[in-house]
Image (tube, rainbow, N blue to C red):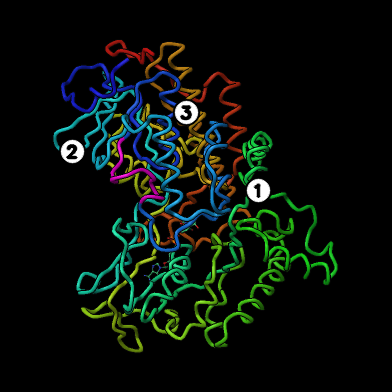
Amino acid sequence: MTDPEQAVARTDDRLAPDVDVLVVGAGITGIYQLYRALEAGFSAQLLEAGAGVGGTWYWNRYPGARFDSESYTYAYLFSKELFEEWEWREHFAGQPEIERYLNHVVDRFDLRRHMRFGAAVNSAVWDEPSATWSVVVDPDTVIRARFMVAATGNLSVPYYPDVPGRADFEGEQYHTGRWPVTPVDFAGKRVAVVGTGSSGVQVVPAIAEQVASLTVYQRTANWCTPLNNAPINPDEQARLRAEFEPICETLQTSASGFLHPVHDRATFDDSEEERRAFYERMWNSPGFSKLTSNYTDLLFDPAANAEWCEFIVERIRGIVEDPATAERLIPKDHRFGEKRPPFVIGYYEAFNRPNVTLVDLKETPIVRVTAGGIETTDGERPFDVLVWATGFDYGTGALTRMGIRGRNGEALEDHWADGPATFLGILSTGFPNLFFPGGPHAAAGNNPRYNGDQVDFIMDTLVHLRRHGYDSIEVEQAAEERWTNMIDRWAAKPPSFGRSSYFFGANIPGKPRRYLLNSGGRPKLLSMIAEVRDNDYRAFRLARTPDSTAATA
Ligand code: N01
């Protein structure tokens, strides 16, 4: 085994790897991957472009950023002691608490000495004779790794819309996905927020009180429902600790990766009165349970969906005092669940403040950004600060920008020119020894749960290779095609996220319209993983490379 501390310094061209497992990205998945690789006795190193731990929870430190999965369901489950000793303050933790937790995990398990920050990967080339990846971190540092695990995340490349004049703006401008570590001072400033996805609707109420004026530029209204956050009281803390095993059991086996109980009734099984009472309970329920615990036909029966939407419409009209603003905030072009629904704290209420204005870009589109503000078709508004809450190049964005070159020098971005082709959302043909948990074709509910499934599979696979003396693994094309075809086929069936959503890459001009999540869901991922194991890894070509030194742990 190699000493990972020496790995970074070595730039020689020897065929033996500097490190067995090179992890890219210090987000939730990358940290877990590093922990598991070290635990299994591999040498491992983690590279992170940012200056600290957290991945998406490092970069998205905008005001109002918080979980909308329950904190304890998003947290790690690999250590009972960790679960018991970390007391989440809120059911849905805010970004500062999340960042503190992740730093605690890194230090508690002594992972930081295996991490290198400010280390963006700009080239990763497969070297056939040695069966290693040559990974260039900066012009002078090449790391030769037996296996590379790109835990680079789905939501890590911010998208700035191509609005004329954006560079001409003379005030401050920020993207929610690249928020500065030094807090932004909004006090008394004229602020614009562009975008009303999950990020935009979190920022708006969080800064509305501080700013002189806040103008929200909305292109598409979203079905926002309350997050219903609360502090975790001492009784709940005790119950969480006492119920670690059943919580794990539920989270590790449920399709969604949440604790929410699944409802057993369809909408029209209930009377009108019962339905209203049920919708009331849903409205007051925590976070995603409006999707996961709602009527069983919510996403399948248009009449069922319409009735729940009508309930939300009533609520919007009841909260927002200005009827014209309320109408603009009501989605017209998609049903609940066809886009990823945001869960909010005081979003609709913010529009009752005299300093908050909504601009509907369908009525008055943006013409340009000027030196002093934003011009729409009805004129220019002056601003001191622009906040771009305009999303990400989802799924493939980070992986196709890393300079990944596989067998015969093939570029990953070329292999995926028509959209991603993967097996299990973990590997791709022509790119041996490269794994990308949490990337395209992965998402299937509560992120850390299925990303964790993927990391667990990667670790079982690496241990299998080591046990049998193999040093390279590549997925057979037939297996990649089977998984990718399943993703595309199932994505076409209802309930499907809308084709206009970023889940199909539709928010990025020129990006192929292919489904980027796991449409088969977590059960499909787990059943395919079981099948691979039962078939003794026959979905893969496993090889010994005579010139190289296999991982020797
Ligand atoms: O990004 P988005 P996000 N002119 O793509 C608008 C996760 N997340 O960062 O809908 C004007 O959803 C765009 O308009 P439209 C979560 O998975 C979780 O908000 O394309 N507007 C839309 O309103 C989420 O789904 C949390 O018409 C433009 C917005 O920008 C994912 O991250 C919190 C525009 C982009 O919305 C992404 O959310 C935050 C243009 N040219 C995020 N281009 C939690 O709570 C785009 N828009 C855990």
- Closest to the observer: 287 or 236? 236
The part of the image, by quadrant, that contains residue 38 is top left
The N terminus, quarter of image: top left
Residue at 52% in and 21% down:
538
Callout 3, which amino acid?
Ile
Side of 237 where 473 appears, left or right? left
Tag count in the figure? 3
Q: Which residue is mark 1?
A: 236
Callout 1, which amino acid?
Glu
For the residues labelled 3 and 2, the Cα–Cα distance comes to 27 Å
Q: Magenta stretch: residue 51 in it?
A: yes
Q: Which residue is mark 2?
A: 138
**Which one is earlier in the sequence, the residue at label 3 or at label 2?**
2
- The residues colored magenta run 47-58
Q: Which residue is mark 3?
A: 458
The part of the image, by quadrant, that contains residue 468 is top left
x and y percentages locating residue 241 in the rendered image: 63, 39
Mark sitting on residue 101: none
The C terminus, quarter of image: top left
